[in-house]
Amino acid sequence: LSATVSEIVAAMLRASDNYAAEMLVKEIDRQAGGPGLTVSGTARVLEENARLGVNVEGVRMNDGWGPDTGNRATCRALLGSLNLSRQPGFSVLDSGLAIAGHTGTLSRRYVGSPAEIRLAAKTGWINGAAAMVGRIAGQPVRRFALLFNGSFGWPTAQATQDRIVSLLTSNLTG
């Protein structure tokens, strides 16, 4: 049995599987009649996001998984992509997120904190750039995107993400 596309996307998001992300971009191009190349796959991803209403102004994708230093993202585009999860056929963009203290890239983070179980997010980090996009359950549900860059390593990136998540989970009810 083969996994469905939704199952592949969910596993990719949860574990931040770079190889799967790159292969999906190539397969998107192949399914659209192209030769299965990264460059045309990323163009198709941006075109489809724009067609679906995601503001892709300022976004540049040179690969499917993020380490190319020419890649550019915006918080607006990340939130727009997350918000696609409200449309039929895109729920995996929310349900596939890692859950704080339990699954994927967040399985060992936020254990015992107000964010545990409430935070569902996709994380990303390469030297000098870090991102997190997701939601925090409560009243109200808080959807957020965080991008920052500079000269820092993983400990600084993680500490910054942790401070923001702490602020977003303070004073939650429900």
Image (tube, grey):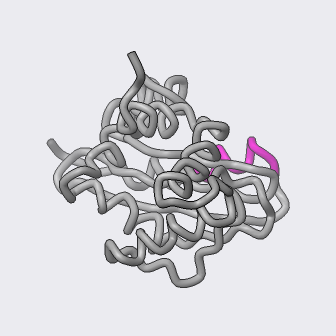
Instruction: Say which residue appears at 58% left-offset and 70% top-offset.
Output: 43
Indicate the position of residue 96 as horizontal and vertical percent values: 38, 38
Q: Please indicate whether residue 129 sits to the left or right of residue 97 in the image.
A: right
Magenta residues, dominant SS class: helix
Above or below — where is 48 with respect to 13? below
Q: Is residue 41 visible?
A: yes
Q: Is residue 114 visible?
A: no
Instruction: Say which residue appears at 41% left-offset and 22% top-offset.
Output: 2
Q: Please indicate whether residue 81 sits to the left or right of residue 16 in the image.
A: left
In this view, the residue in front, 20 or 166, is: 20
Q: Please indicate whether residue 70 sits to the left or right of residue 64 in the image.
A: right
Quarter of the N terminus within the rendering: top left
Residue, far right: 151
Q: Which residues are magenta?
A: 153-161
Indicate the position of residue 51 as horizontal and vertical percent values: 36, 76
In this view, the residue in front, 95 or 27, is: 27
Residue, far top: 1
Q: Please indicate whether residue 138 sits to the left or right of residue 164 in the image.
A: left
Instruction: Say which residue appears at 81% left-offset and 48% top-offset.
Output: 153
Above or below — where is 135 with respect to 70? above
| Picture quadrant where residue 9 is located | top left
Above or below — where is 34 with respect to 97? below
In this view, the residue in front, 25 or 32, is: 32
Instruction: Say which residue appears at 37% left-offset and 68% top-offset.
Output: 80
Quarter of the C terminus within the rendering: top left
Indicate the position of residue 39 as horizontal and vertical percent values: 68, 65
> Is 113 included in the stretch rendered in magenta?
no
Indicate the position of residue 71 as horizontal and vertical percent values: 71, 67
